[in-house]
Amino acid sequence: MKITNICCIGAGYVGGPTMAVIAKMNPKIKVTIVDINAERIAAWNDEDVSNLPIYEPGLAKIVKETRGKNLFFSTEIDQAISESEMIFISVNTPTKTYGKGKGMAADLKYVELCARNIAEVATTDKIVVEKSTLPVRTAQAIKSILHNTGSEVKFEILSNPEFLAEGTAIEDLLNPDRVLIGGESEAAIESLAKVYGSWVSQDRILRTNIWSSELSKLTANAFLAQRISSINAISELCEHTEANVSEVAKAIGMDSRIGSKFLNASIGFGGSCFQKDILNLVYIARSYGLNAVADYWEQVIILNDHQKRRFSDNLISTLYNTVSGKKIAMLGWAFKKDTNDTRESAAIYVADHLLSEQAHIAVYDPKVSGIKIQSDLNYLNTRTEEENNDLVKAFEDPYKATENSHAIAIMTEWDEFKTYNWGKIYDGMKKPAFIFDGRNILDKTEMETIGFEYSSIGK
Ligand code: UDX
Ligand code: ADP
């Protein structure tokens, strides 16, 4: 099938950047991104591209180049489905918060709604591409919904998981390590391979069966998260043995069998994928009765929770066992640098713990608004919204955020934090002035020379 018209359902962190790059690299294909969230679509259509709903380096420039030419954002879902030959499903698949599999399984209701929507509206043959991360065997459910419409329309289902990381999405999309396409129909696979072929060499486009493709996405994220939990486990041991986790990471990373990436000890991984995907893997393994497999992967999450807790426990014990009424300044709220995404950010859990110990929290993040910070905390339901409002304040200036604070906790590795006038910050703080560097981004000697009591992870 020659593709001239693509529809993407879901204008989020995955759908937005991915379709923007597909549109840029395929000027002859019309790409329409649709979403039920009208506010989000309006933000994507904002004339001022600095107001796009997603912050991602390089994204605004591509949207500016392509929007209105061959990239469109719309709430007219049915129309976009009906006009397209290929439909990407990029809706969210959060962990279930109710019923069977609560807290573990992926909630597939949004995916199912999309499949039903496509089934209802389609009058011509379609290739349906799973872009959202889904549990292995989801394609079966989509297939069953699409193939039971009673109409003559033919659907081919492909799995094409996204491997981009937020903060580097555009770079990852432009130069992917690989593009993975799983499916049954060779013709459908080749149609999608051709779309990517505009800028990705064919030897990097991997074709597999659909189940391998679905499972590879979960497995890739589980392996990546496992590396972080592994180095974080070693960080705790370092703190007890005078070993230095950065030195250990460098030493092991130079072994080409291990490799140097993803060995930065931290306050723990966040983001919309790692925890959700591992929970998914664990849930699937348990549902097949594979308890040893499930326990093995679950430990990656247990260790991650432990790392977040350990960070806040250490902060409290260092501040003479109480943070009650003290001002703690948090630098960074996003789950990593160069994104405004806060899903599962370690900062949320550390803040929640400190708030339960009656701390006052001041937050500065270059890309996250105070409203978002409040809604992240309210979502946990630990205390009333009024209490969160009283105890947590967001600032637009890091010097104001840290003024009169007892301690600073660095939660995100934003580059700008390294360039601050730390002497000025020190002068404005209560003494002794503590820094808890959850990202190991500052220089210990320099901070101690200024006068800070500095502690980091794994050193
Ligand atoms: C991840 C995968 O990398 C990506 O391939 C997949 O498509 C989606 O999930 P993402 O969650 O956007 O991407 O970011 P990633 O760079 O993987 O970081 C995840 C978390 O791990 C962040 O909180 C980050 O700070 C943390 N991290 C990462 C560490 O703590 N140490 C590291 O060495 C690397
Ligand atoms: P991701 O990180 O996977 O991209 P997001 O939450 O950022 O997740 O984006 C998913 C988007 O999908 C949201 O904007 C949401 O409104 C949209 N969405 C969810 N269900 C539907 C649906 N049935 N039809 C259209 N859009 C949907």
Image (spheres, grey):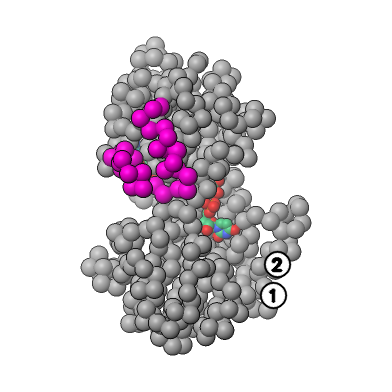
Front residue of this view, candidates 203 and 418: 418
Which of the two labelled residues, at mark 2 and mark 1, occupies the earlier sequence position? 1
Q: CA distance from mark 2 to mark 1?
A: 8 Å
Query: Was residue 219 drawn as part of the magenta stretch in this picture?
Result: no
Q: Using the rendered view, name the quadrant where residue 29 is placed.
A: top left
Q: Is residue 33 visible?
A: no
- For label 2, the crowd category at 10 Å Cα-Cα, with few meaning under 14, some 14 to 19 and many 20 or more, is some
Q: Using the rendered view, name the quadrant where residue 171 is placed.
A: top right
Residue ID at (75%, 58%): 254
Residue ID at (34%, 33%): 73
Magenta region: 41-70
Residue ID at (61%, 66%): 233
Q: Secondary structure at mark 1?
A: loop
Question: Residue 353: percent from the left, percent from the top?
Answer: 40, 71
Question: Residue 1: percent from the left, percent from the top?
Answer: 50, 15
Kind of residue at badge 2? Val
How many numbered circles does the render carry?
A: 2
Residue ID at (38%, 66%): 364
Q: Is residue 322 above or below residue 267?
A: below
**Disc number placed over residue 243 in the picture, else none:** 1
Q: Is residue 170 above or below residue 159?
A: below
Kind of residue at badge 1? Ala
Question: Residue 63: percent from the left, percent from the top?
Answer: 41, 38
Circle 2/circle 1 CB separation < 8 Å: yes
Q: Secondary structure at mark 2?
A: helix
Location of the C terminus by quadrant is bottom right
